[in-house]
Amino acid sequence: MKKEYINWGLVIGVGLIATVFSITAVLASMSGTITVLSMAVVLLSFAAVGFMLAGYVRQLQAMAHSISVGSQIRLTSEYPADSILNEVWIAAEQFLDGSNQKMKTLQNENQGVTWQLQLLSQQKNSVETVLNSIHDAVIVTDNRDRIILANASAENIFGFKFDRDVFQPAQKMIPSEELVAMISKSRTSRTAQVRHELTMEESGNPVSYDTVLSCVEDGRGGVLQIVTVLHDITREKEVARMKNDFVSHVSHELKTPLASINAYAEMLVDGEAEDIETIQQFCGVIQSQAQRLSRLIEDILNISRIESGLIKVSRETHSLALVIRDAVEMITSYAQEKNITIQSPAPILYDQVNIDRDMISQVVINLLSNAVKYTPAEGRITVDSVLNEAEGQITVTITDTGVGIPAEDVDHVFDKFYRVQANNKYAKGTGLGLNLVKQIVETVHGGSVFVTSTPGQGSTFGFVLPLSKETAAQSVS
């Protein structure tokens, strides 16, 4: 049976019940008593009305639930087309259709806003990730000199923790008053970009930064942000200084032999050498200075090749004791001129090293030559080698009884062109020999060099080389 017939039946039934109820009430008033029939009619009337109201309540509950979950609402008329109730339902349905359309529009707009928020969040995270990956320090301040953004490098340099929820004044977070003043000046002057060199103390050492401050303005010409970028140029300045020192030292060292060669050549041309002995003397000076010049150029080229990785290395397995023995034999005649005794080590069973023999031989000869130069007559030079099986390496030391090295110079003797001023009167040199030793041992062969010295008592120069893999395995077994 269709719902509209049921509803019409209910309406007619309610009307009949109401009529009966009226008649019963009249009879009751006439008789003065409430009959059982009248009570039954009343109860049936309330039941019918309650049944109808319960249906309406269920529909209202369904409507409320649909609204709460954001779904569209649909109403179906259950009354005849020409009834007033049907017109009410049609009006309600039209109102709810408009509400459904607005709700759908709001849902679409809300979804679009959600997507935009997610996109902005991703972009913000990407910007922070990029900033934190930059080695240079980046600080962004607002128009009140408050830090609104800082990367990890800036936090490490200035020792603060950036809080994105609380904007702290730059003056409070940055310990450098000079940088804070630069930020404030850039903001007030509204200069598009300013470059400064900033020097600060870090762990007791001066550190230089190339600092660039950029002013970001809004569309109305007001200062929006100041972006500060600090690039560490300490190493670059040190390299530039070393290059300048290198050129200066090379120029000085080249001038000395060239000046001697030029002077004696001019005397020969002018005929100032009138006898064979004088001519031979002048030629001897020219030859020795030319050899000195050749050694200087060769040392410079070797150091340059090693540092640039262009030197040709021919590595084979050799006995280090034999290399030392050959070097001692080459330097013995030079030592005998000063009555200096050289004591060399006894051969070691397992002292095989994978080396470029010519290079390591040059290392030993340079160290022995320096020991002879700075050891007075009747002195003694001791060469020793110690095998460390556990570490798989061998240590060679050359100890002399010479003049020694002042404590303030010990850490610099392996630097390029460095010469101990207190010892210049004992021997001449270019200051490249020990640096070449360091480059050959450490850069080419992966070893290490060291020196200890006591002024007036002597010095000990040494180097450490790794044993060959075969030798290390034999010594362990």
Image (cartoon, rainbow, N blue to C red):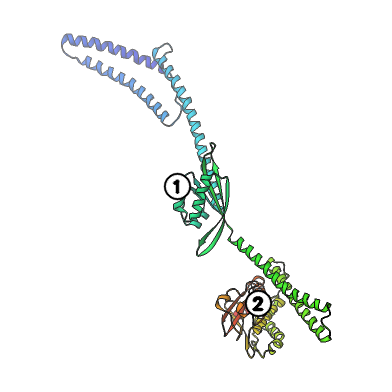
The answer to whether residue 141 is above or below residue 250 is: above
Q: Is residue 196 left or right of residue 30?
A: right
Decide which of 443, 408 is in the foreground and name it.
408
Q: Is 384 placed above or below 245 here? A: below
The answer to whether residue 314 is visible is no
Residue 227: x, y in percent?
Answer: 54, 48
Name the residue beneath numbered marker 1.
Answer: 167
User: Going 25% across and 19% down the picture, which residue do you hit?
Assistant: 43
Label 2 SS = helix
Question: Relative to the observer, which residue lies in front, 146 or 394?
Answer: 146
| Amino acid tagged 2 | Glu
Residue type highlighted by circle 1? Phe
Q: Quadrant of residue 198?
A: bottom right
Picture coordinates of residue 315 (x, y %)? 71, 74
Secondary-structure class at tag 1: loop
Q: Residue at x 53, y 45 (%)?
A: 189
Q: Quadrant of the N terminus?
A: top left
Front-lying residue, 121 or 136? 136
The residue at which mark 2 appears reads as 470
Q: Is residue 170 above or below residue 377?
A: above
Mark 1 and mark 2: Cα distance apart in space:
63 Å
Percent x, y for residue 399? 61, 84
**Residue 183 vertical placement versus 306 (above, below):** above
| Residue in the image at 17% along x and 8% along y | 30
Considering the image in quadrants, where does the C terminus appear?
bottom right
Residue found 48% across the figure and 31% down from its top: 107
Q: Which mark is residue 157?
A: none
Could you tell me residue 170's position as x and y percent? 47, 50
